[in-house]
Amino acid sequence: MTQNKMTADLLWQLGRITALGLSNDKKNIVYKVNTPSIEENKQNTKFYFIPIDGGNPSEIENTDSILTNKKLSPDGKYLLSHQEVKLQNVLGEDFYPELEKAEVQIYDSLNYRHWDKWNEGKFNHVFYKENKDDAPQTDIMENELFDCPQKPFGADEDYIWSPDSKSILYVSKKKFGTEYAISTNSNIFQYELETAKTTNLTEENVGYDVAPQFSNSGILAWLQMQHDGYEADKNDIIVLFQGIKFNLTAHWDGTVDSFLWSEDSQKIYFIAPIDGTKQLFEVHFPGLTKMQPLVQQITNGYFDITNLIGFNDTKIIVTREDTNHAAEIFSYDLVEKHWQQLTNINSEIYQSLALSNAEKRYVTTTDGKKMLVWVIFPPNFDSSKKYPTLLYCQGGPQSALSQFYSYRWNFQLMAANDYIIVAPNRRGMPGHGVEWNEQISKDWGGQVMDDYLSAIDNISQESYVDTNRLGCIGASYGGYSVYYLAGIHNNRFKTFIAHDGVFNTQSMFGTTEEVFFNNWDFGGGYWEKDNAVAQKAYTQFNPMNFVEKWNTPILIIQGGKDFRVPIGQAQEAFQAAQLRGIKSRFLYFPEENHWVLQAQNAQVWQREFFKWLKETV
């Protein structure tokens, strides 16, 4: 049996694949591979194509000659693009050009910063022009203080051509300032080239409308959430056909990640979380018949499908990963129900490693529900031994705890360091029905905390768990969970690690940038004294209020450019721990946001993570 195990250095030698699409002739899959360089502190990128039926990859300098340009209109006459446009005075030099050395920003409303960037008065706009050199560009959002692509993560998938090349469809949240910060009401707009008229296609819906996509026969579909301000709402597939809108997933108890029309426009394939994984589903489009759309799960297994690329006869091309393997490109035969791995970016490395085993368990919660818990065991696990065990608290709070492969919270790496990981699909996770997912809203410190403790208590009954060496770790809402459990764990844990976690719900509400998030999850502002739900969030569910019960070492990690969970949260927690005489450490990354993206920073993160565990567990 091989004895090599995953290491922090090796984790950052893995190639990270991104599928770019099918080639023009549909005979090849085009993709890029980013490989981090710790020495250069950057990622190196190479482009490849591989035959759609499998074979040897070929490296190419760029993808222009082989990949369809989706920004070229179907008739070939026009090109789409986007760029930032300066429309608002914000900087001192905007107001006082004679004071050129002044460094100041002036705001009259919220949305003055977002994710990891300050608002400098620039907005993403969509442009089109004739497909010839030096043709003038037309801004289809001229003078609008709105963004497309959306910030912070939108890209060129936020705007597409109509099949007849006569209009442009684009996604934008057309709200400004404070209204923008408290709303999730994005819409899909249609801009007519001939008349320059813009129509809101989703005006009646007040939640997210995103990801417009036309079928081969010209039928429009998109993703939609119903409630304004609820960013983790049930995500449905909407189809517009002959002027009528159909919700294909309304009666299905789940939420959609992404989708792809079938080649014949008769059905839609989509990815969705289910029972601790992310699988492929299909839903038939019934047209104008009165048949209710039928949703069917197509794949099943201990893996996540992460991206839909295209089709090859009866096969669908996807990317797939699991807790032991970073993403690779696969094909799945929809008829024969057979998988084929097409790329092998990291196969040689994985073949040299002893891999961990992920076991799926079901634990009964304090309210009598069945909860899925992933238990990840060290490579070459020996049940006659005792192992230190980590309770992993997922962020989100409403993000799936599935078979994901993270380059920071990497279960394979943790297990390779001889830790057992307990990862509960506690309340507030998709993949277990809408009710289970929604229960966490306005109840951050309630049933979910019992779920965590039910999971660790259940696994702790096993003889191979060293109950004197339990740790609790997590980021974002997982970091909140760590801070909260530190005050109520009744000496279960010997150590805590919180990364970019919420420590004080009141100051979090006052400093986070997407106000709609805490507005929904906390139930309102801390000044709403007659709002019992909100007041519960700022008192009973506020980790700060349980610091007097802290008695356990804690490592606190924070990114300086994290505007989602700003630096004050970590500062307050560290200061409280230090002043109470609790062994604590503050790991601060000035240039990182809610994540850790730079190679050398990531190495420091991993080394400090395991160093702390060795010191305290």
Image (cartoon, rainbow, N blue to C red):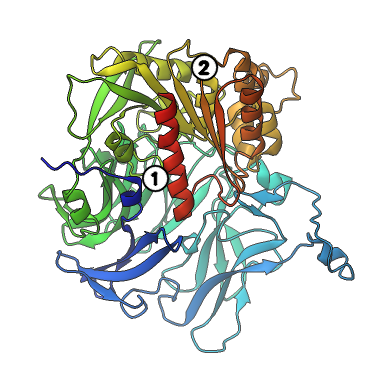
Q: Is residue 542 visible?
A: no
Q: Is residue 473 left or right of residue 181?
A: left
Residue 265, given in percent of the width and then of the height, sits at: 29, 58
Task: Examine the image and state in which quarter residue 313 appears.
Answer: bottom left
Local crowd at mark 2 within 10 Å, few (<14), some, or many (≥20)? some
At a point 37% along the width and 14% down the height, the residue shown is 454
Q: Amino acid at mark 1?
A: Asp
The disc at residue 257 is 1
At a point 45% along the width and 57% down the height, the residue shown is 212
- The span from disc 1 to disc 2 (Cα, nearest Å) is 27 Å
Is the residue under label 2 in contact with that under label 1 (CB below 8 Å)? no
Q: Is residue 182 above or below residue 36?
A: above
Q: Nearer the viewer, residue 221 or 504?
A: 504
Quarter occupied by the C terminus: top left
- Mark 2 lies on a secondary structure that is loop
Quarter occupied by the N terminus: top left
Q: Nearer the viewer, residue 237 or 271?
A: 271
Q: Amino acid at mark 2?
A: Gly
The disc at residue 446 is 2
Q: Is residue 386 above or below residue 70?
A: above
Residue 525, given in percent of the width and then of the height, sits at: 71, 28
Task: Examine the image and state in which quarter residue 366 appears.
Answer: top left
Q: Is residue 91 visible?
A: yes
